[in-house]
Amino acid sequence: MKRLQRWLAGIFILFISYQLLASVIYTYEVAAFYGEAWSMDRHGLAMNGNAVFGDMREISELAAVDAKHCPNITSVRGEITMGMVGGEMVCCEVANEHQRTVPYIEKGGNGHYLCGKWPAIDHVFRPLNL
């Protein structure tokens, strides 16, 4: 019985450690997306996949035309990962099916969106003049 308790305690500690690390890295990535150096005083700590600072936009702006078509949307990593939010297909990695907003900036004539959660963060953009 003690052996099982040690295993469960170890698994719990690993889980908590992973969640903390993922949240720190995610918060750092969101700050970098906005062109800022991350600071705990300024940015705090966002739960992985749930940004708590900066301009946000509805993820529904990235709705797919169909299951394979994302017109004028480009992923910085080279391929678009589709996600489902509220029964709607979107052209962006999602943190979870209930995600409604993502970090957003306008730069170089494009709208940029930071989707997903660490380690699957997806930075996509599309032209503003469409």
Image (spheres, rainbow, N blue to C red):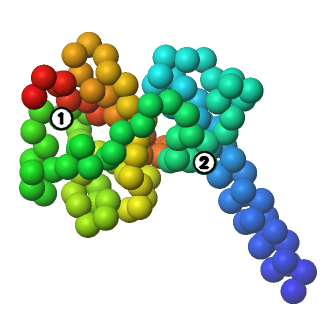
Quadrant in which the N terminus is drawn: bottom right
Residue 36, by quadrant, is: top right
**For the point 32% across and 59% down, which residue is it?**
85
Q: In the structure shown, which secondary structural element does the residue marked by tag 2 occupy?
A: loop
Number of residues whose C-alpha sits closer than 10 Å to that of mark 1, classed few (under 14), some (14–19) or many (20 or more): some
The residue at 75%/65% (across/down) is: 12
Do we see residue 98 in this rendering? yes
Q: Relative to the observer, which residue lies in front, 68 or 46? A: 46
Q: Position of residue 90 (x, y in %)?
A: 24, 51
Q: Residue 8: which quarter of the image?
A: bottom right
Give above or below for 23 relative to 110.
below
65, above or below 28, in the image? below
Locate residue 51, reporting x and y percent: 53, 41
The residues bearing labels 1 and 2 have C-alpha atoms spaced at a distance of: 26 Å
In which quadrant of the rendered image does the C terminus lie?
top left
Question: In what element is the residue under mark 1?
Answer: loop
Q: On the image, numbered disc 2 is attached to which residue?
A: 47
Q: Is residue 77 visible to the viewer in this orientation of the structure?
A: no
- For this view, does 44 lie left or right of residue 61? right
Q: What's the amino acid at mark 2?
A: Met
Q: Is residue 10 above or below residue 37?
A: below
In the picture, the disc for residue 31 is: none
Rendered location of residue 75, percent (x, y): 26, 33
Going by the picture, which residue comes out furthest to the right? 2
Q: Is residue 100 left or right of residue 53?
A: left
Residue that sits furthest to the top in the current view: 108
Residue highlighted by disc 1? 73
* Horizontal side, residue 37 vs residue 103: left or right: right
Q: Residues within 10 Å of mark 2 (few under 14, many from 20)?
A: some
Using the image as rendered, state which of residue 34 and residue 10 is in the foreground: 34
Q: Sequence-wise, which precedes: disc 1 or disc 2?
A: 2
Q: Amino acid at mark 1?
A: Ile
